[in-house]
Image: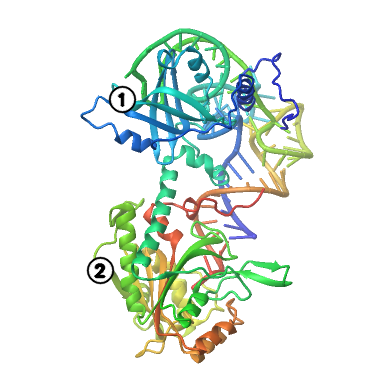
Amino acid sequence: MSEDKSNSTPQQDTPLDGSDQFAVRQAKLEQMRENGFDPFRSNWEQSHTSTEAQSLLTEDMEEGPEVSVAGRIVAFRLMGKASFLKVLDRDGKVQAYVRKDEIGEEEYATFKKLDLGDFIGIRGKLFRTKTGEVTIRAQEYRLVTKALRPLPEKWHGLTDNDQIYRQRYLDLIVNDQSRERFRTRSQIIREIREFFWNRDFLEVETPMLQSVSGGAAARPFRTHFNALDCDFNMRIALELHLKRLLVGGFDRVFEVGRVFRNEGLSRRHNPEFTMLEAYQAYTDYRGMMELTQSLIQQVAERSLGTLQLERNEGDVIDLSGKWREAKYKDLIIDAVGRDDWFELPKSAKLEKAKELRIEVDPELEDFEITNDVFEKIIEHTLVQPTFVTHIPRELCPLAKITEDDSSTIDVFELCINGQEIAPAYSEQNDPAVQRDAFMKQVGEETQELDDDFLLALEHGMPPAGGMGLGVDRLVIFLTKAANIRDTILFPTLRPF
RNA sequence: GGGUCGGUAGCUCAAUCGGUAGAGCAGUGGCCUUUUAAGCCAUUGGUUCCGGGUUCGAGUCCCGGCCGGCCUACCA
């Protein structure tokens, strides 16, 4: 449909029947302009937010002070010569009561022409209605911004997923739960920063455009830089640059930032997602264990006020106390039901995997079959916080090898809510061992060899523990979201 | 990428065997000075996602496409 923008006067000879709500609202807007109001230019001074205003009327008071609020009309109940409406602003909703005999006949006539979705300012004293709701008795109101499109339905809200993601603003206006979830997400990220600042970590920013994207084995997004006429990748991890800063003498650094992985979409994967990584010199993965547990406990306590998280499944995740530790090998042996799993030849492992109904590619390496067992039958059972330790060295080329067991590395993988949420390592700082580990990966895997990083290691990186945490996944279980897309304001979608 | 389910009014949803496409909310016109999904009366509004096909007749059946949900695969 194309509107004729050149025709600024509404066609008065064809009365609007109300079928085209956009046209009806546009006609109202034109009418206002003719009467000398600009429905977009006015501002309104807020004295309080909706919830601040409501708190001013305490139990013992009959009438509160005068307040001035502004927001979007989300409920509108006209009753002849008086009306109730609800105004939504940044921290909630407040009800207002408008009477014809208090604002005047003319004002009331134009007030009745307002629409759901319009922004208005209201000034008046607080009182309590019959049913006890704190309400503003309007002495003055003004339209601040006209909304030309109608809001989604008031009771069911917006449920169409596609529209929720593509027009997130509508979701935020009408779905309280969604609005609340994104406020919580913001609070969580704020508490994460607070935690690290308090521990004397330096918050830094490292490049998103990199000529070599290392630190993980995911496929990158590629782009081209015209000025230098060369290709760049978007980063897939923060790790290698943060470690360069350890070399540079920043003993404690962290970054919260977006990383990009050119892989599939799923309920738990978005191609751009938010990663927290922290590196601390003169500690190891054990130190990271204490840090990670404290971090998540403090964040949950401060942003949710509890360490007991009820899941949609009905059970409760208990974040309190000291968290369970379990060795990778023990979990595997337990899951497959035989002590000699790690001594079995590959053919026997494949056989057993088939028995357990795990689909495995016979081309896989031994350790990959084992890891499939972990990912497909163990990981989703780790609902209570569990540090999985002593992971096979092949899985993490960037970690230190365990002193008394050269087959494993000094790392943990923290699982909560059946999801891997935060890995941490005693970071590998021997440049030769690091190079060997990289070389084994390059070619068969997607990790690229970052020579510049190895050069940095040759200058000496102090012993350190490091950890990474998928912020979106943390938000998923802290806010009981069903899907990663419900925790990302504008998730990646197929363009129209 | 594969499987599967879906797309109907601004929104939330109906539509029997293939037989005139409906309701609630929103809108429009009235009534209503403490409502809470306000209420009452009246009423407008449809390229049934798009394009083909079968049929006397298609929202419904078939084919192709677009978009999405869920499952699955890739993502140490």
Q: Which of A465 and A456 is in front in this view?
A: A456
Rounded to the nearest angstrom, the CA distance separating label 1 from label 2 is: 50 Å
Residue kind at label 1, given as amino acid type: Phe
> Which of the labelled discs sits on residue A164, or is there none?
none
Q: Which mark's residue is nearer the viewer, 1 or 2?
A: 1
**Do the residues under discs 1 and 2 have CB atoms within 8 angstroms?**
no
Report in which chain the residue with disc 1 lies.
Answer: A
Which quadrant: the N terminus of chain A?
top right
- Residue A393 horizontal side relative to residue A331, left or right: right
Residue annotated with mark 1: A127
Q: In this view, does B73 lie above or below A79?
A: below
Using a 10 Å C-alpha cutoff, classify the residue at mark 1 as few (fewer than 14 neighbours), some (14 to 19) or many (20 or more): many
Using a 10 Å C-alpha cutoff, classify the residue at mark 2 as few (fewer than 14 neighbours), some (14 to 19) or many (20 or more): few
Residue annotated with mark 2: A322
Secondary structure category for the residue under label 2: loop
Quarter of image, res A228: bottom right
Report in which chain the residue with disc 2 lies.
Answer: A
Q: Is residue A475 above or below residue B13?
A: below
Sequence-first tag of 1 and 2: 1
- The number of callouts visible is 2
Residue kind at label 2, given as amino acid type: Lys
Q: Residue at x 43, y 81 (%)?
A: A427
The spot of residue A295 in percent (x, y) is 34, 65
Quarter of image, res A353: bottom left
The spot of residue A223 in percent (x, y) is 68, 67
Q: In this view, does A105 lie above or below A152?
A: above
Q: In this view, does A451 lie above or below A470?
A: below
Secondary structure category for the residue under label 1: strand
Residue sitting at the far left: A60
